[in-house]
Amino acid sequence: MSDDLRRQSADPTVEAPTVLVVDDDPTVLDTLEHLLGTEYRVLVAADGPAALAVLEEHGAPAAVVSDLRMPGMDGIELLGEIQRRYPETSRVLHTAQADLTSALAAINASHVLHMLTKPASPRTLSATVREAVHRHHLAITEHEVLDKTLRTSLDALFGVLQLASPQAFARAGRIRDLVDLICQQLELTSVWEIEVAAMASQLGAVTVPPSVLAKRDDGIALADDEQRMIDAIPRAAVRLLADIPRLDVVVDIVRGLYDEDGVRARESSATARVRTAVMVLRAAIAYEAVRSRGVATDRMLSVLTTDTEIDPEILAAMSEVHGTTTDAAVTAYRVAELEVGMRVAQDVVGVNGAILIGRGMQVTEMLVERLTNFQCKGQLVEPVLVGSSGGSS
């Protein structure tokens, strides 16, 4: 064959679904490519390692049709690896009658969603692949709906934290911003999970009296019982999040803050990812703690190096982004002048001293409404100080 890719579609304006075909028999490979090429964008590979290389280059397909017996990596092993890397991809095993026992074992292990026996008729092949592609479409649609629902639910949850404990929300936001910068330096993937964990780690602060949170945020030494309250914050967060679907990795990251041996990630790659995330999040929390003690900006990294056990690679990344977290010049605004997207440079407090918006928080429509209501009742201390740049203050 002249190409590893064939693209044909009845409507040239519509991107055809991608199907990967894997077989070590060139004749079978040519036949399957020809039969499927009129309806799908077809990728082909002669063995398991070649198939994984093709997917690395082209991305996840809608379906994979793989032979069972191939040298090196057989079809069951290949489809199991594809299941791990691309869980929404439908997997079809193309096997001879004599291999049915092995094929059924693969189906029972969930590595295979469909099975074709050789030689499959064009009609059977077409129907099976069409069903596999349809199943992939349903899986992707469900994933997108769940993803949107999850993100919306988290936004609502953090919105409640923002109003219930502005101090904790602001601190979480500062930690998240630093986590994001460190992750960029380290070129880490799955940053969304680490950022959510940074915010989620402070959810338990709603159980702590504001006076204790204020002492912590001001770098004031805590009594033993107060320190126990602060130490319990991540545990409370885990209890709140543990039963939410698709947050396993986030929960494991938060749990790792107080119980590294309790991480429950179920695969080695996820475990490594979680442990890296825990180290990054711990480093960002340590940075925030040193900063709250009033340590001079030019001494913060040396203090962190002396007082904490931060991974050298993460510390190097923090040194690269350290300048982006310094305080920016501030401008005073009245509440009526605030705009969505501004970042508060200092805590906004009520006349009774209660914090209404924490330092570093971005102004939202809801926060403007909150401040307007407090101002209307004469319970707000103006002006509001806003950083002159959009960076973290």
Image: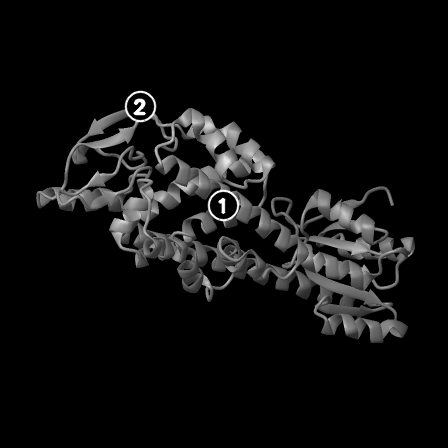
Pointer 1: residues within 10 angstroms few (<14), some, or many (20+)? many
Residue located 84% across and 64% down the image: 68
Pointer 2: residues within 10 angstroms few (<14), some, or many (20+)? few
| 263 left or right of 229 in image | right
Q: How many marks?
A: 2
Disc 1, SS: helix
Q: Quadrant of the C terminus?
A: top left
206 vs 54, nearest the viewer = 206
Q: Are marks 2 and 1 in contact (CB under 8 Å)?
A: no
Residue placed under numbered mark 1 in the picture: 282
Q: Work out whether 152 lies above or below 108.
A: above
303 vs 17, nearest the viewer = 303
Q: Residue 373 location in percent, x, y?
A: 14, 46
Q: Amino acid at mark 1?
A: Arg
| 390 left or right of 250 in image | left
Which label sits on residue 116?
A: none
| 264 left or right of 181 in image | right
Q: Residue 220 location in percent, x, y?
A: 31, 42
Which label sits on residue 329?
A: 2
Q: Note whether residue 201 is visible.
A: yes
Q: Amino acid at mark 2?
A: Ala
Q: Residue 218 location in percent, x, y?
A: 30, 40
Disc 2, SS: loop
Residue closest to the far front: 224
Report how far apart the C-alphas of labels 2 and 1 lie in the structure.
Answer: 28 Å
